[in-house]
Image (cartoon, helix red, strand yellow):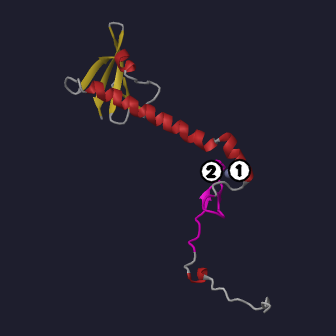
């Protein structure tokens, strides 16, 4: 018997009964342009191909965060170096030769803040702060806890 090709077969679409997929939230384009867009797929991270190419070639956003991470790393390492020497304190502060701190990684270019009291300049890190002075032609550092 010749099959009736015109006969319509009812296909049950199981998807009809499934809950609607949750909408994909808008995302910020990864190229660093600052645009927020509605992605068509969950793995779409760039607005379009031009932005993807730009992001791949320039990595602007990564550079921005890399500098920030680098600065934070140095600040924490400075704080750690101060803490190490603060342990040997006598009284409320530790007095050391500045070069010893530098040998332990203190980078004078990175501080979270400065202050001036009684004509002395203080440099702040997260948990410690310090004051530098010269004694017998040797640069000394006094370390305090915040
Ligand atoms: Zn973009």
Q: Is residue 27 visible?
A: yes
Judging by the rendered image, the residue that carries numbered circle 1 is: 51
Answer with the quarter of the image where residue 83 lies.
top left
Disc 2 to disc 1: CB gap under 8 Å = yes
Q: Is residue 32 magenta?
A: yes
Which residue is at a point 73% across and 52% down the rendered structure image?
Answer: 49
Question: Would you identify the image quadrant in which residue 7 lies?
Answer: bottom right
Write the residue at 68% across / 89% down.
Answer: 10
Q: Is mark 2 within 8 Å of ligand 1?
A: yes
On residue 30, which mark appears? 2
Tell me which residue sits at (23%, 23%) in the image: 88
Residue 37: give x, y in percent of width and height: 65, 60
Relative to residue 96, is residue 123 drawn left or right?
Answer: right
Q: Is residue 102 left or right of residue 54?
A: left
Q: Regarding mark 1 in the picture, which secondary structure is present there? A: helix
Q: Is residue 114 above or below residue 90?
A: below
Residues at marks 2 and 1, CA–CA distance in whole angstroms:
8 Å
Q: What is the secondary structure assignment of the residue under circle 2?
A: loop
Where residue 12 sits: x, y (%)?
63, 86
Residue 54 position within the rendered picture, expressed as x and y whole percent measured from the top left: 71, 45
Q: Which residues are magenta?
A: 21-43
Magenta region includes residue 109 = no
């Amino acid at each position: 018997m010749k099959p009736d090709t015109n006969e319509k077969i009812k296909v049950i679409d199981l998807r009809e009964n499934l809950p609607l997929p949750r909408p994909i939230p808008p995302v910020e384009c990864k190229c660093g342009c600052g645009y927020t867009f509605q992605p068509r797929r969950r793995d779409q991270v760039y607005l379009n191909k031009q932005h993807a190419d730009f992001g791949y070639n320039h990595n602007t956003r990564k550079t921005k965060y890399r500098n920030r991470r680098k600065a934070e790393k140095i600040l924490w390492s400075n704080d750690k170096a101060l803490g190490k020497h603060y342990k040997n304190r006598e009284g409320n502060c530790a007095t050391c030769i500045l070069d010893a701190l530098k040998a332990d990684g203190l980078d004078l270019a990175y501080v979270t803040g400065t202050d001036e009291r009684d004509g002395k300049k203080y440099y702040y890190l997260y948990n410690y702060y310090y004051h530098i002075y010269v004694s017998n032609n040797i640069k000394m550092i006094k370390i305090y806890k915040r």
